[in-house]
């Protein structure tokens, strides 16, 4: 089933002629030769002591589509799956990042969500981050990948692992029905702003359903107008009002929706900062964001990071990690700017 998904992904990528978003750190490698890369990786994996430098270079300078081609050629020429050989030859966090890079974007997100709900406890932060930031198309692909990878329905899994208003917000996002146009209805924006104010600050208690309905259905341009209009009714910004009104997982979900809708690079810059703030590193979050945004908007996130925190993301990663793990993350991050 998994190879089926990869095949579909390869076909889609070929049809789209390598769309290049505005701010990726990884772009299509010129004069790409999947077979040559497969040979180079095999040599690096079987070199004395393993040539990690070559492995890191190839995996972080090829797009996901190109990595899928390399993996397919590797299996055809070597007779083994590249992920299995990487697993046997690498270790620790370098192994984790390398294996993650071999998954399609939908597989990667599906595995992240599965891991977030596996065993005791739930990583609610991971559920929120993925579902608030992915497009309708991406969410539908994640649902399909989850079914293929785990023979399980993602919505049912989320329902069994969450509850209450937080569950409602996640299921609304999972419907993947957000308006994704750039149209702004100014009358509706004013109605939405007033509705949000009346659902929160103006009343005792919070009408969370109104927040969920508006925040999960309107497009980004419209919502930015709503956030501007909100200040006509309140002395607070929407996220501050939510912070005052709510607590726990539903607060995190709705504030994340506001932040991600308002300024996605800024949202991820803050997440990256939090992943390295204080003692220890939240490696899962750090890896997840660098991989998932590397072909989307990681350059924009780097700009936002420097503006917010006065230092580069590159330096922050360098100060917080070490060894081959540091090298592969810095390679994903791109230049120190």
Image (tube, rainbow, N blue to C red):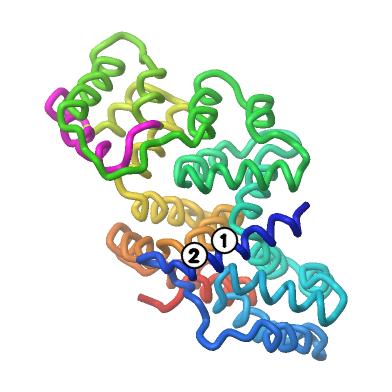
| Dominant secondary-structure state across the stretch colored magenta | helix
Dot 1 crowding, Cα within 10 Å, few <14, some 14–19, many 20+: few
Would residue 233 be counted in the magenta stretch?
A: yes
Taking depth in this image into account, of 175 and 10 the one nearest to the observer is 10
Q: Residue furthest right?
A: 79
Report the quarter where the C terminus lies: bottom left
Tell me where residue 42 sits by quadrant.
bottom right
299 left or right of 77? left
Q: Position of residue 328 (x, y in %)?
A: 59, 74
Tell me where residue 262 sits by quadrant.
top left
Q: Position of residue 202 (x, y in %)?
A: 23, 13
Q: Secondary structure at mark 1?
A: helix
At x 27% / y 22%, what residue is drawn?
196
Location of residue 16 with respect to 34 vertically, above or below? above
Location of residue 331 with respect to 30 vertically, above or below? above
The residue under label 2 is: 16
Q: Residue furthest left?
A: 232
27 left or right of 44? left
Tell me where residue 91 sits by quadrant.
bottom right
Q: Which residues are magenta?
A: 217-236
Would residue 1 be counted in the magenta stretch?
A: no
The residue under label 1 is: 12
Q: Position of residue 309 (x, y in %)?
A: 32, 60
What is the C-alpha distance between the residues marked 1 and 2?
6 Å
At x 55% / y 18%, what residue is drawn?
164
Residues at discs 1 and 2 in contact (Cβ within 8 Å)? yes
Label of residue 22 in the image: none
The answer to whether residue 156 is seen in the rendering is: yes
């Amino acid at each position: 089933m998994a190879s089926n998904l990869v095949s579909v992904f390869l076909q889609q990528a070929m049809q789209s002629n390598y769309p290049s978003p505005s701010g990726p750190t990884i772009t299509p490698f010129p004069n790409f030769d999947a077979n040559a890369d497969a040979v180079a990786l095999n040599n690096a994996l079987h070199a004395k002591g393993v040539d990690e430098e070559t492995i890191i270079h190839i995996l972080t300078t090829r797009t996901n589509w190109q990595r899928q081609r390399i993996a397919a050629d590797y299996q055809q020429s070597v007779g083994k799956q590249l992920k299995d050989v990487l697993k046997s030859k690498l270790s620790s966090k370098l192994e984790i990042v390398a294996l993650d890079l071999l998954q399609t974007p939908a597989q990667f997100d599906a595995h992240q969500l599965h891991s977030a709900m596996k065993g005791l406890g739930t990583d609610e932060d991971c559920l929120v981050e993925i579902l608030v930031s992915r497009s309708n198309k991406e969410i539908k692909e994640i649902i399909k990948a989850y079914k293929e990878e785990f023979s399980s329905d993602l919505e049912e899994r989320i329902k069994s692992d969450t509850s209450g208003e937080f569950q409602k917000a996640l299921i609304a996002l999972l419907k993947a029905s957000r308006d994704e146009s750039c149209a702004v209805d100014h009358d509706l924006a004013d109605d939405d702003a007033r509705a949000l104010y009346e659902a929160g600050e103006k009343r005792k208690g919070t009408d969370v359903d109104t927040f969920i309905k508006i925040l999960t259905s309107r497009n980004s341009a419209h919502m930015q107008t709503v956030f501007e209009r909100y200040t006509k009714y309140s002395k607070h910004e929407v996220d501050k009002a939510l912070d005052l009104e709510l607590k726990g997982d539903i607060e995190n979900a709705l504030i994340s929706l506001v932040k991600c809708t308002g300024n996605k690079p800024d949202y991820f810059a803050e997440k990256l900062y939090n992943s390295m703030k204080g003692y220890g590193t939240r490696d899962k979050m750090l890896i997840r964001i660098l991989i998932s945004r590397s072909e989307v908007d990681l350059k924009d996130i780097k700009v936002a990071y420097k503006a917010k925190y006065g230092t580069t993301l590159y330096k922050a990663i360098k100060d917080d990690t070490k060894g081959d793990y540091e090298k592969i993350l810095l390679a994903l991050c791109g230049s120190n700017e």
